[in-house]
Image: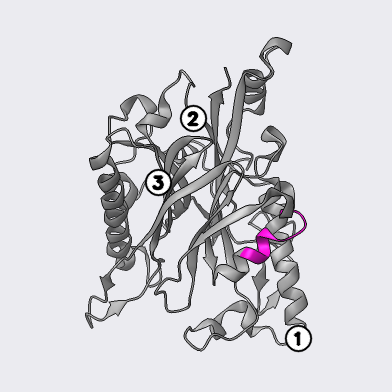
Amino acid sequence: MKNFKTWFSVVLITAVLTVNAQEEKKYKIHTVAFYNLENLFDTENDVEKNDEASPMMEIKADREEIYKKKVHNMARVISDIGNSITGNSPALLGVCEVENVKVMEDVANDPLLLAKDYGIVHFDSPDRRGIDVGLMYQKGLFQPISKSTHTLKIFDDNTRKRIYTRDQLLVSGNLEGELVHIIVNHWPSRRGGEARSRAKRVAAAKLNKHVMDSLQAINPYAKIITMGDLNDNPTNASVKDVLKAKRKQKDVKIRGIYNPFINMFKKQGLGTGAYRDSWSLFDQIMVTKPFLEKDYTHWSYYKAGIFNENYLVNKKGRYKGYPLRSFADGGFTNGFSDHFPVYIYLIKKTE
């Protein structure tokens, strides 16, 4: 595994924003991020879900205090993503592995984030365990216009019984006056092996593509951001063949999509999670072509990265170098998540 620093140069961003005193206020910059919150469940048993199998519910002592620590740890990470460049936490943050809207509200109300005044978009999904996706947004920066949930219907190959999994969340709204569309995903896992489960993620990619196609049928120049834990790498069929995500910006045609995480994975060996000493980059953010315009008179894609600060990395033991997760061996580690967050920067001229 190569040095796990983000691939972009902070110097480049700083140079664009502060070349000299006359240009210091010429650009605005916002962070758009995604974070798998690793089993952020509350402490109450929901009789309509299989939440008793969650790591939080398996903890027998001091569960309420552990829950508060877990929430605070999530808020700490969120407050830090992009802050060194923008002076702010993410304007838009997609999340997954949340049980309900309450746990998202608890994160948003943590002292580290309370002043950011985050709004929340969440729908209960049909996932058997109650694992959902959601969107957090700073109300002063983004105003939702519409929100919808899109159900993925997949079936077991042998029994033909339906497999209940996460919906895909679509939120359209104005980012400081400019219409953007955000899709938040958490595609089916690799349970049973990558090959055996591949068709489920291909189906998820087809649904994601259908949602984007629907938006682009109305406006081919729709500014769409699709993000999530895809449980596939940028090189897998779901992303490469179904979404047809491109590695180079110049190859993206109208209605196409650009994936900055392809190069991170293929050329630099970077990842957001590890298993059996093999790194994966399941967490990705992709943007449609209108974000790639370089005059910066509207919100434009600038850079992407993996938020892998030192405090998020396991320092010792068998999993040294891995993300410092919250739960292991039936207990709470006071860690964070088994995934590193990912993010992109959007910039725009202020004049």
The answer for how far apart the CA atoms under marks 3 and 2 are is 24 Å
Image point (72%, 55%), residue name: 114
Specify the color scheme. one colour
Where is mark 3, residue-wise? 234
Residue 132 on the magenta span: no
Indicate the secondary structure of the residue bearing disc 3: loop
Can you tell which mark lies on residue 164?
Answer: none
Indicate the secondary structure of the residue bearing disc 1: loop
79 or 173: nearer the eye?
A: 173
For label 1, count other residues whose C-alpha is less than 10 Å away and answer few (under 14), some (14-19) or many (20+): few
Q: Against 338, is 162 above or below?
A: below
Image point (37%, 68%), residue name: 193
Indicate the secondary structure of the residue bearing disc 2: loop
For label 2, count other residues whose C-alpha is less than 10 Å away and answer few (under 14), some (14-19) or many (20+): many
Residue type at tag 3:
Pro
Place residue 169 in its image quadrant.
Answer: bottom left
Can you tell which mark lies on residue 61?
Answer: 1
Left or right of 55 on screen, residue 151? left
Magenta segment, which residues?
105-113
Specify whether residue 297 is in view: yes
Q: Position of residue 8 (x, y in %)?
A: 58, 31
